[in-house]
Image (spheres, rainbow, N blue to C red):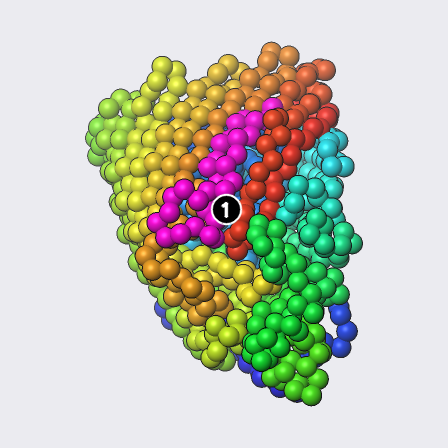
Amino acid sequence: MHSRTWRLGAVFCVSVLCCSAALPGAAASVIPAPTATPTPLREIGSVSVSSRSIPLHGSGADVVLTGTDLRRSTSSDRFSETLIQLPGAARGANGVVHLNGDHGVINYVVDGVALPQALNREIGSEIDPNDISFLDAIEGAYPAQYGLKFGSVLNLSTRAGSGPAGFDGSIQYGSYGDIDQALGYHAPLPKGGGIDIAVRNQQTDRALDPPELNSPHNQGSDSNQFIHLTLPEKHSRTDVTDITLTHSLQTMQIPNDVANGQPATTDDTEIQDDTFLSVQFKHALRSGGQITYGPALKISHIQDGGDPRNDWAYGEALNVLAPPFGNGGSADDCANALVSQNFQPTTCAYSLNDKKTSLDYLFHGDIVEHYGKHEVRAGLGYDLTRVDKTYNIILQPNNFLAPIFFPNAPNVPVALIDSSPNLGNTYQSYLQDNWRISQKYEADYGLRYDYFSVRSSDFAQGFGAFSPRLKITRFFGPRTSVYGYIGRFFEPFSLENVDPLIGELLNLPLQPTLAQFDLKPERDTQIEFGGHVPAGKAEVGFRVWQKNANDLIDDTQVGVTALHQDINYAVGRLSGETLDYVLPVARSGRVYANVNHTVSLNAGCETQLLAPCFGQSSGFTPADHEQRWSITSGFLFNDTRGGWFSGDMEYGSGLSSAVCLPLTSDCKATPHTIFSAEKGIALSKNVALTARVQNLFNDRYYVTLLNAQGNHFAPPRTFDLGLKFGL
């Protein structure tokens, strides 16, 4: 039996003088498979937020949403659907959202703490919209305090109990057997402060976007628990301790392409289990400033379960038929391909089983102080991460590796196993100043430093960068301004990585030699111009930007498995233009509309670690997550009785296809126009019946077609009825 032992890990250092810890030994082997196996004050009932006015920091396309906006939206059941309404948003497979031409790299900041993103997955799916009291979406012109991910920054403030004790909740029933139940309780504490507790459980027969119109074998569930404690300090009226605890458990079946021969009983599944705990101490300064600091913990566990017999027989992840439904393949197909190539390496069907757990131990501190016309902020952050993983990728009998490693038994399955843990540390620090030079001019400028390193038994690398940023704003009145911005960004790659040997074996014969660990962090320069102008009672924001990226980070599938790993393109050219209209209406309602044009181009695939450059064309090609045009609009009208009427519209020109030719702009295959509406009928001041329809005109479209994510259909028209109380 052929085997090889190595260790794979990553270390992100707390400083340039970083401390290292020894990794325990972990084996990766090739064996025969024996069998197939900054937070605003919050109040319950009324959220204290600033009005929808010109933001002091950020871009011309930023969006502010209150808890009422979120809970009365037609997309209140899924956070990803809420994000689709943001300017520059594009749909990806199974709930992934791409903002501003980037590959799903969204920075979620929950109660002042950036949510760790060690595992490759749909980040943010563990966040329950019902637990959010305030959302501030920053689309660009990022000040120095923000780092790591730059598709967008989402500042989320969770619900916090205060005022008289009370309950709130909802129950909804809808299409595809959808059941959604939520219950919350808030109460003041005897010595001050308050507690907020919430639980939510959802079940559906359509959890993911399937590869065909129907949705067989697609059940899923999502269970969320939430606790927020606000504890005042004994000897201070202003100092508080905020404790936030969230837990999410999601289960989902992998939908099948029954129309092309896959059995509806295929048992591929996925489980996602996430826990996040944050303890933040807040000390008020006499000048009106504040010091915030404290630890946090994030535990994420993902488990994929395969079904080797059906995966091999029906090629679960193998496209051997003509597109767009190419999902056939069998053991005989694999054997015939081997014979035709004189048993040279060729791609056959795989079955994937994996378990991966990331542990993130965080600490962060921030201080804001006022000095005359200056508001100075400084902060630092540290994240110690450990990723324990076991990948078991089982190749079907007559696979291309069997004759190499088992010449006397070429018809046995082969398992590629990677059980090497990854260890990492990240360090972040920044200093920035908001200087109101005069009534007409304001300057935001700062410097950020990020450092991380990666280490294993085979390599040790470190990366660091300074990121200066400058924004100058010219005010022409209380509602009119323009700004110019230039900034440098530094984006680390994911800590979850398959060992190079696995990538080498899965990508034979295109990668005949062992690849080096050659991933690089992304370094960007962004130039931006924007502002705000009044339009009667409404406000119009605009933004024009260009990002030039070196070593642009994307991700791809490892072989034909369900694993996705980071890769680099040598350069990226991203740009966009956005026009955003917001009209406040009576009783805290709003009307909004935005138009966005985005270009996202890549050139020079340069990564050999996990996926070789499969025939990468010369010159720039559209990214598979690029959507050139998007238009979203909507409204929320609250009535005097406690009811509401809300609606959303979304147009997208569709993601680029992998079959796009270089510099081709007319290869979009998934344009769509979606209308949704919800009516809340007040039964009393705090109780309302709800009726909702999503995708009103039943636009059946592909979310993705012929790209690395596979083929995925969006949901059809769906209905649901419900009851909400504690409004």
Above or below for 398 versus 668: below
Above or below for 644 versus 433: above
Front position in the image: 684 or 566 = 566
Residue found at the far front of this picture: 340
Quadrant placement of the C terminus: top right
- Apparent side of residue 217 relative to residue 48 in the rendered image (left or right): right
Specify whether residue 668 is painted magenta: yes
Q: Residue at x 55, y 35 (%)?
A: 82
Q: Main secondary structure of the magenta part?
A: loop
Quadrant of res 540: top left
Q: How many marks?
A: 1
Q: On the image, numbered disc 1 is attached to which residue?
A: 108
Residue count near mark 1 (Cα–Cα under 10 Å), binned few <14, some 14–19, many ≥20: many
- Apparent side of residue 650 relative to residue 251 in the rendered image (left or right): left
Front position in the image: 633 or 349 = 349
Q: Position of residue 208 (x, y in %)?
A: 65, 46
Front position in the image: 510 or 376 = 510
Specify whether residue 418 is painted magenta: no
Q: Position of residue 51 (x, y in %)?
A: 43, 25
Front position in the image: 557 or 527 = 557
Q: Residue at x 57, y 50 (%)?
A: 324
Evaluate whether residue 123 shows in this view.
no
The residue segment tinted magenta is: 648-677
Q: Residue at x 50, y 42 (%)?
A: 669
Kind of residue indicated by mark 1: Tyr
Residue found at the far top of this picture: 640
Quadrant placement of the N terminus: bottom right
Above or below for 309 versus 151: below
